[in-house]
Image: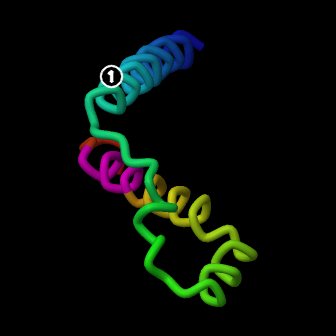
Amino acid sequence: MKTVVIKFVLFAGLYFVVHEFIGFIADKLPTFAGFDELFGGLPAGLWYFLDIMQFPSGFSMVLSAYLLRFMVRRVPFLG
């Protein structure tokens, strides 16, 4: 029982440190919210289908997932 408590405290502390560190790093990263401007040169028909498929939000989610996977793999005891 003692080891369970120690592991719980250790992993709770680790979770807090990683959570705060990711928040700190996310504030330092540059932001880019100009997908409409970036894809402004696309024809209207193509933009219509991209809009139906929610491409800007989907692209943001996929990019965030890849970034999170990259960061988790850099932590030696998690990845």
Position of 20 compared to 50: left or right? left
Residue 9 vertical placement versus 49 (above, below) = above
Residue closer to the observer: 16 or 48: 48
Residue 76 vertical placement versus 66 (above, below) = above
Residue closer to the observer: 72 or 61: 61
Q: Type of residue at label 1?
A: Phe
* Residue name at image x 55 percent, y 87 percent: 43
* Residue name at image x 33 percent, y 24 percent: 21
Residue 70, magenta (yes or no): yes
Q: Position of residue 79 (x, y in %)?
A: 34, 51
Label 1: state its secondary structure.
helix
Colour setting: rainbow
Position of 57 compared to 21: left or right? right
Q: Position of residue 62 (x, y in %)?
A: 51, 63
Residue 3, magenta (yes or no): no
On the rendered image, what quadrant is the N terminus found in? top right
Q: Position of residue 35 (x, y in %)?
A: 47, 60
| Quarter occupied by residue 31 | top left
Q: Which residue is mark 1?
A: 24
| Quarter occupied by residue 70 | bottom left
* Number of numbered markers: 1
Residue 18 vertical placement versus 76 (above, below) = above
Position of 64 compared to 29: left or right? right
Residue range (magenta): 67-74
Residue closer to the observer: 34 or 77: 34
